Image: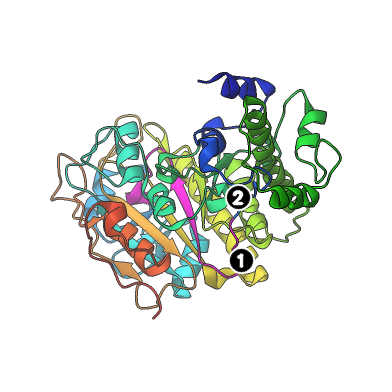
Amino acid sequence: MSHTRRVFLQKGLTLVSAAVTVPTFIDKTVWALADPLDTHRTQRDSGTDGKILVVVQLSGGNDGLNTVIPFADDTYQRLRPGLAKAADQVLKINNYIGLHPNLTAIKSMFDDGAASVFQGVGYPNPNRSHFRSMDIWHSARPDDDTPTSGWLGRYFDNTCTGDDPHAGVAMGDVAPLAMKGERITPLSFERPENYRYKGNDVERYHELNSTVGIDGRSKKQIDSGAARTKRPQIITPTSQLEFLTRTAMDARISSEQITRMVNNYQTPADYPRGEFGQGLRTTAAMIKGGLPTRVYYVSLGGFDTHANQGGRHDNLMQQLSQGVDAFWKDMRDQKNDQRVLMMCFSEFGRRVEVNASSGTDHGAAAPMFLLGPAISKRAGVVGNHPSLTDLDGGDLKYSTDFRQIYATVLQDWLDCPSKQILGQQFKTIPIFKS
């Protein structure tokens, strides 16, 4: 690391996730940059007309069999004593499957034709490790043992100009691999106010980033003078440091802009308490505020239910439903619902048979949801429910490759060719309104 970079970092640009922002303005040479007074890097989109994807990750391995429930299958009841939901409890979708009793919001959206349920989603040779399976789902590259980019990150790389951190926003202290590109890594924070400049020399920082230059001239005067003289700019360690510090203003602007959006946001929607509910509320506030973000990422954790699953999973399903209900109420009130799609997934399902601790162990195939009024009413349930007797070492066999759903979202929702992002062309699934 050069002296200039070391000094700059020591000056105190501390962000919740340095990896999210530092590469944007550290890992570029000064020569590759334009006028250092022109450091604005936000997208020019208004943020009020483009399509938006909201990804909801159910972390830990959601029990798909108690989410999309084959209530009419005797094997389900037999292999899950004390855990299986009775047929009269299930929110029936057809005469074989139904949703968990607490998923009332998703059932309501399904009845309105605004939800699609994908059954038996997975990939060949499934891995039952949390970390490895998460890498596979996030990277969409099962054959890569050490992925460095995610499918959404490569979407940003292929479609976003410049280095706009607003391309995507992840709720959490670390951006998920799915959002990391080779060139662009979006914002990631638990609370908007944490994403800001926290250096000791705040006065100097504000001076560098003010509309008046250090010598008292306005930036317009400086630009005008430079244009008249047409002298080449002399790059010095001091000017590099000042440029880097000035560029850090983007972080401060982002923080103040987002914090203002969230803190001033008024909504009648009743979000569940906790990080998940707050993450969805923050997402709704930023959509309302017109942030030019195309992908938001929110997680609901706690799904690794090896023991005493019943009550824990019921509570998680309740949180998911309450969050979905509040978020879509917000979107309708904002009149943004037509431009938003929500995708719910988990890194794997659970085993068919209940274990000795009244829980379920790591499995394979599981259901996914796509939610939003852009879904065609004809989409409904996609695929057949996996067999409960024809198993793969005790696990459900997959019938839909998750990369088909990614390809569908990329091509038919985000309007981006998927082959370069996913490494091969996967067949898309017709689920959106024409």
Whether residue 263 is situated above or below residue 399 in the rendered picture: above
In this figure, what is the number of numbered marks?
2
Residue position marked by numbered label 1 in the rendering:
331
Q: Is residue 397 left or right of residue 379?
A: left
Q: For this view, does 264 lie left or right of residue 39?
A: right
Q: Nearer the viewer, residue 139 or 393?
A: 139
Magenta segment? 43-66
> Label 1 is placed on what type of residue?
Met
Q: Give the crowd class for mark 2: few <14, some 14-19, many >=20 residues within 10 Å.
A: some
Q: Nearer the viewer, residue 335 or 145?
A: 145
In the rendered structure, does residue 45 fall within the stretch colored magenta?
yes
Q: Please tell me whether mark 1 or mark 2 is closer to you in this view.
A: 2
- Identify the image quadrant of residue 276: top right
Q: Is residue 86 visible?
A: no
Q: Is residue 383 left or right of residue 163?
A: left
Q: Quick one: quadrant of the C terminus?
A: bottom left
Task: Residue type at mark 2: give it.
Answer: Arg
Provide the secondary structure element on which disc 1 rests: helix
Q: Residue at x 80, y 42 (%)?
A: 210
Residue 418 lies, in percent from the top left, at 31, 60
Q: Residues within 10 Å of mark 1 (few under 14, many from 20)?
A: many
The earlier-in-sequence mark between 1 and 2 is 2
Task: Name the mark on residue 41.
Answer: 2
Instruction: Out of 240 and 318, give the one closest to the viewer.
Output: 240
How are the residues colored? rainbow
Alpha carbons under labels 1 and 2: distance apart: 28 Å
Q: Is 125 situated above or below 292?
A: above
Name the spot of residue 371 as percent of width and height, x first: 46, 64
